[in-house]
Amino acid sequence: NAGVMQNPRHLVRRRGQEARLRCSPMKGHSHVYWYRQLPEEGLKFMVYLQKENIIDESGMPKERFSAEFPKEGPSILRIQQVVRGDSAAYFCASSPPGRDRASEAFFGQGTRLTVV
Amino acid sequence: AQSVAQPEDQVNVAEGNPLTVKCTYSVSGNPYLFWYVQYPNRGLQFLLKYITGDNLVKGSYGFEAEFNKSQTSFHLKKPSALVSDSALYFCAVRDTHGSSNTGKLIFGQGTTLQVKP
């Protein structure tokens, strides 16, 4: 059973370009969470999605950031017109379906975005 | 507001000595508490969790944690540290209060553990 897969592992973008980060959850998992880790900081929640639905986007910046989790395919975190402050590690986590809050989340290896 | 605090940025211990990484939390309702470890340029690996029951929880790699409700703490411990335990450790809480909670994790700032030979 493959773990949470994120790609790319490293992404370099010039200011103003778009960054697209992908996350495939563990098999059987239907809940996806995105977190951002800024340098020297802990992880901050960004968005929580289930298939075809955004459940909680309270941690997403108001502009330039969007996320989706289509019926087929991976979850995508999209950052438009990137700025240097977007440079960070972006982690995806997945958990099983249902409201079992006792279940731990499983994290991917992360995508390290560098904006130059 | 929900929060997690890890008061120490770094903990240094000698190999073979016991280690403790501190964590305190503040939530409404019953806390679900987790510890994760992050090695350099890697993702987070689950170590252990407290949901209910025995206050002493045992996890991966010989780690354990003690839940203390009165002190709102969930300190991570290991009786004998290894050099390979050197990494960044995160405490996290998932609040289960109310129907609107979405299961997201609230993380502490992280504590770097340095184990010296």
Image (spheres, helix red, strand yellow):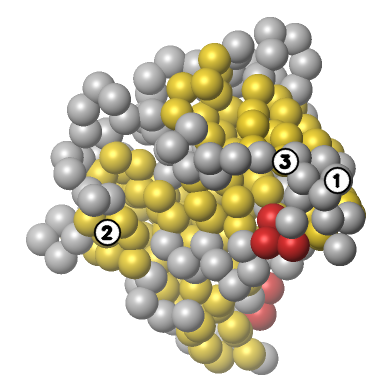
Q: Nearer the viewer, mark 2 or mark 3?
A: 3
Few, some or many residues within 10 Å of mark 3 (<14, 14–19, 20+): many
A86 or B60, which lies in front? Answer: A86
The residue sitting at 54% across, 44% down in the picture is: A61
What's under tag 2, amino acid-wise? Tyr
Residue bearing mark 1? A17
Q: Which of the 4 quarters of the picture holds residue B26? A: bottom left
Q: Name the subunit of mark 3.
A: A
Point out which mark residue A86 bears. none
Give the secondary structure at mark 2.
Answer: strand
Horizontally, residue B9 falls left or right of residue A108, namely left
**Circle 2 Cα neighbour tier, 10 Å, few/some/many (<14 / 14–19 / ≥20):** many
Position of the N terminus of chain A, as image quadrant, is top right
Determine the chain carrying the residue at label 1: A
Amino acid bearing label 1? Gln
The image position of residue B108, as x and y in percent, is 42, 62
